[in-house]
Amino acid sequence: MRRPSPLPPPVRGAAKPAADPSGAPRERAELRADELDDAPVIPLAVPAPLPDGRAVSDGLPGGGQADAAQAAPVGWREVWRAARARRKALRAEVRRFTARQRRRRAVWIGSAAALVVLALATLGAAYSPLFAVETITVVGVDALDEAEVAAALEDQLGAPIPLVDESAVKAALVAFPLVESYTLEARPPHELVVRIVERTPIGVIETRAGATVVDAAGVALSTAPTGPEGLPVLDIRGGVGSDAFVAAGQVMHSLPPEIRGQVTAVSASTPDDVTLTLGGTNTAVVWGSAEDSAAKGAVLEKIMAARPPASVRSYDVSSPNAVVVR
């Protein structure tokens, strides 16, 4: 029986066994001792020395041996453990991320639900008897009777404030000719405030039916056999629907209160020849058109203070920059 030859030393830098395509490492081939003699001899490649005479392996750590040669081969168990650890880490990260998303989604859904519930509760309370009208307050009236206006709106008592019938309120206030406009103001829980703007009468038109009080829009406010004191008599050609009446109404609105109280008559045949008459002295004020009425009123007030109506026959302020006093 032949004595086996000693095994050759391992070849440095030899290639590792190729892995199987399925992913499992291929088993390392083993050589029997009796096959070593027939095995081909592979010459070792000796690296050329460096220019300074040192060998290539002299610069490597570990006494000239590379770490790659000393590293043990990685088996399939280590690969499997690493892959398993990576999968666990990924699953933990996914769980952490999805939990944070769920918490954030729950916060948003909870906030939205709370807002919806609050809105529904508010609407339910607003339309319930908890906010029913129990008091109607009328403000802004002077010539009108406050109690009479409030009595006309009694049908709104008991209705929830958001359900107040505005058309019914309008129908009730139309019956009062002095009401020019109005607004409704809710004061929870039980008060409804009605703010009224009254029409301002500018004079009296004498007709066959008697003396009719009208405002600047030509709305008849009242009719009586004789006109009330303090209102001028209007002598307007064309009636309340003419341009002359519109101009006369604008002039009366622009007069200072001190002068308006002294006017006893207003006449106009066209929009450009409005004339006022001051009581007591029958002094005429030639106003002209309604343009620059504010400036004309201020100039007239200064001139009347300097020269009272008792000392003049007329004031001509048709041109406020060149006032004529006679």
Image (cartoon, helix red, strand yellow):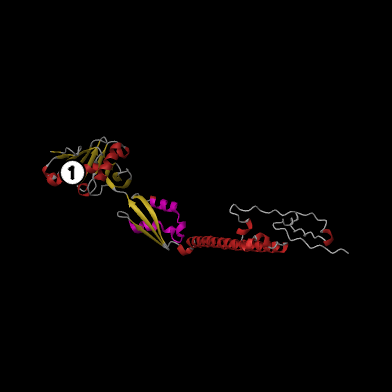
Kindly indicate the quadrant of the structure image that contains residue 15.
Answer: bottom right
In the figure, 167 relative to 119: above or below? above
Kindly indicate the quadrant of the structure image that contains residue 281.
Answer: top left
Q: Left or right: 260 with respect to 43?
A: left
Q: Is residue 154 magenta?
A: yes
The residue singled out by tag 1 in the image is 300
Extreme-front residue of the structure = 53
Q: Left or right: 226 with respect to 69?
A: left
Span of residues in magenta: 145-173
State the image coordinates of residue 211 (x, y, percent, origin top left).
Answer: 28, 45
Q: Amino acid at mark 1?
A: Leu
Please name whichever residue, 144 or 190, is drawn nearer the observer in this view of the structure.
Answer: 190
Q: Is residue 278 visible?
A: no
State the image coordinates of residue 59 (x, y, percent, origin top left).
Answer: 60, 58
Please name whichever residue, 295 or 277, is drawn nearer the observer in this view of the structure.
Answer: 295
Query: Mark 1 packing: few (<14 Cα in 10 Å), some, or many (20+)?
Result: many
Q: Left or right: 148 with respect to 89?
A: left
In the figure, 108 relative to 256: above or below? below
Q: Is residue 101 visible?
A: yes
